[in-house]
Amino acid sequence: MTGALVGIVGTGAVGQTLAAGLVAAALPGRLLVVSRQPDQVRALAADLQDLAHAARSRTVVEPGEVADLHGCDAVVIALRTDFTNTAEHDIRRGGASANAPALGTLARQLRGFGGTVLVVTNPVDLMTRRFAEVSGCARVFGIGSNLDSTRYRLLMARYARVLPEQVRGHVIGEHGDRAVICASSTTVNGVPVHVPIRAVVDELQQRPALIRTGIGRTRCGPAGAVLSTLRKSLGLADGIEELSVPYQDVRLGIPMRFTGGRALACLPNLTGHERRRLDAAATSLRAAYTRIPAHTERIAP
């Protein structure tokens, strides 16, 4: 589906980086940019049009409105409301109450949408659940655990002194402090390996802090995760992505195998400890969801 129409909701740092990555890769035939700030939408669309021409990309970039998203094959939600995150723990959950009303409003406006929705807005597991429940859309995936998994494979490749492509392994559960490393099923060149779990956990937790301290917000990593997932969800490539999907009565990261655009969960065999940690993440997310405003309306995005 190289002529696909993709919409991006949100024109902040993450939305801009996502849009630039999609245009540079010439993934969609058309890219629709949507935000509640018309001047910013027009400006970003113009900048992306310049990029498309300079990079010889065939992607046609257009400013749009929420109503136009119903004609898209896929919609990427990267909106973020204005708030100050004062959380010292569970930092990604710090924007839950602020972002949930905007996600809910957008979800109501997109009821009946039949394409793929990729949610990037944090806390991604909670926001993915909110959007899916309010919109009723069938194909809603959250971006988060696949970025954790990418970082994990990079770190493991460094420890094993191999190329990242030689490492197979997943990080599942919540995108955040309760991520679950599937150490028992990690392999290098198909061979099980010992995972220096404490060192890996420490580095996984330090990496986003390093990025936030230096440039304010993680943006390029999520852009890459979205690009990879869009290729698979649009049927342009087959493979596995760790995405926030239904687990029990919550949403959290599970490996999803895409074949011809269709997704099927492929959770690896877990040890008792890994399963308990996954269920603990679900319990925590379940409790956190009850604390999110349920019916507050806000203009989105």
Image (tube, rainbow, N blue to C red):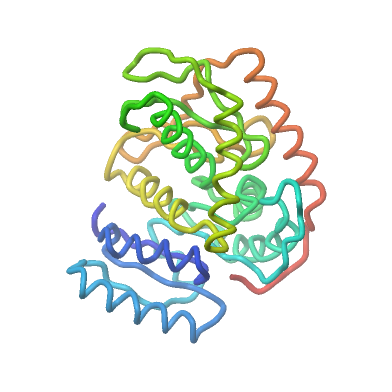
Residue visible at 17% across and 69% down in the picture: 56
Q: Is residue 182 above or below residue 109?
A: above
From the top left corner, tell me how far across and down residue 281 is, in percent: 70, 32
The residue nearer to you, when weighing 282 against 54, is: 54
Q: Nearer the viewer, residue 51 or 89?
A: 89
Residue lying furthest bottom:
39
Q: In this rendering, would 292 be left or right of 231?
A: right
Q: Position of residue 204 (x, y in %)?
A: 56, 38
Q: Is residue 238 above or below residue 193?
A: below
The image shows a total of numbered marks equal to: 0
Q: Quadrant of residue 69?
A: bottom left
* Residue at x 42% of width, y 61% of height: 18
Outermost left residue? 56
Residue 170, given in percent of the width and then of the height, sits at 48, 29
- 23 or 212, nearer to the observer: 212
Q: Residue at x 26, y 63 (%)?
A: 29
Q: Is residue 239 above or below residue 277?
A: below
Left or right relative to 180: residue 184:
left
Specify the quadrant of the image occupied by residue 106. Answer: bottom right
Residue 139 in percent (x, y) is at 49, 46
Residue under the point 66% across and 66% down: 102
Q: Is residue 187 left or right of residue 253?
A: left
Identify the image quadrant of residue 166. Answer: top left
The C terminus sits in image quarter: bottom right
The front one of 14 and 103 is: 14
